[in-house]
Image (cartoon, rainbow, N blue to C red):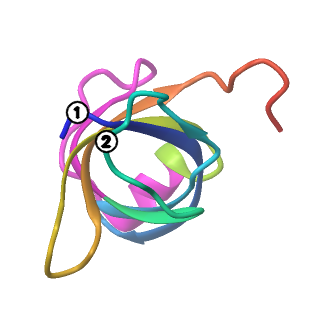
Amino acid sequence: MGDGIGGPVMTILTNNAFELLVSHIRKDNKEDYGKTEKIIIAKIDNPDEPQYTETTQVQLEQALKGKFVSCNVQYRDSKTDALVCNVFVQKPPEGFG
């Protein structure tokens, strides 16, 4: 797919999935996205913790809850309707929040 979306992490659902409030969408996206999307993490890049490994739900909540992330969409899981993404923790854009 190669689409990109971003926004704050609202709810941690499992040790590798969360709900994203979609506030930013790349202009060249091929697919449509809802106001909120369930994200399954394929890979995560957090500059504060570069040695990211498999986590518990609590650890994921500490790492991501309330933070602004950008998600490079790999594909939409047809069974769960969740987006499988590479996730990047970022500083929020100017004027965000």
Q: Secondary structure at mark 2?
A: loop
Give the labeled residue for mark 2: 30
- Which numbered disc, 2 or 1, marks the residue that appears first in the sequence? 1
Q: Which numbered circle lies on residue 2?
A: 1
State which quadrant residue 38 falls in: bottom left
Q: Three-letter amino acid code at disc 2? A: Lys
The residue under the point 55% across, 65% down is 36
The residue under the point 51% across, 64% down is 34
Q: How many marks?
A: 2
Q: Nearer the viewer, residue 50 or 5?
A: 5
Label 2 neighbour load within 10 Å: few <14, some 14-19, many 20+: few
Q: Quadrant of the C terminus?
A: top right
Mark 2 to mark 1 CA distance (whole Å): 8 Å
Q: Are marks 2 and 1 in contact (CB under 8 Å)?
A: yes
Q: Three-letter amino acid code at disc 1? A: Gly
Span highlighted in magenta in the image = 40-62
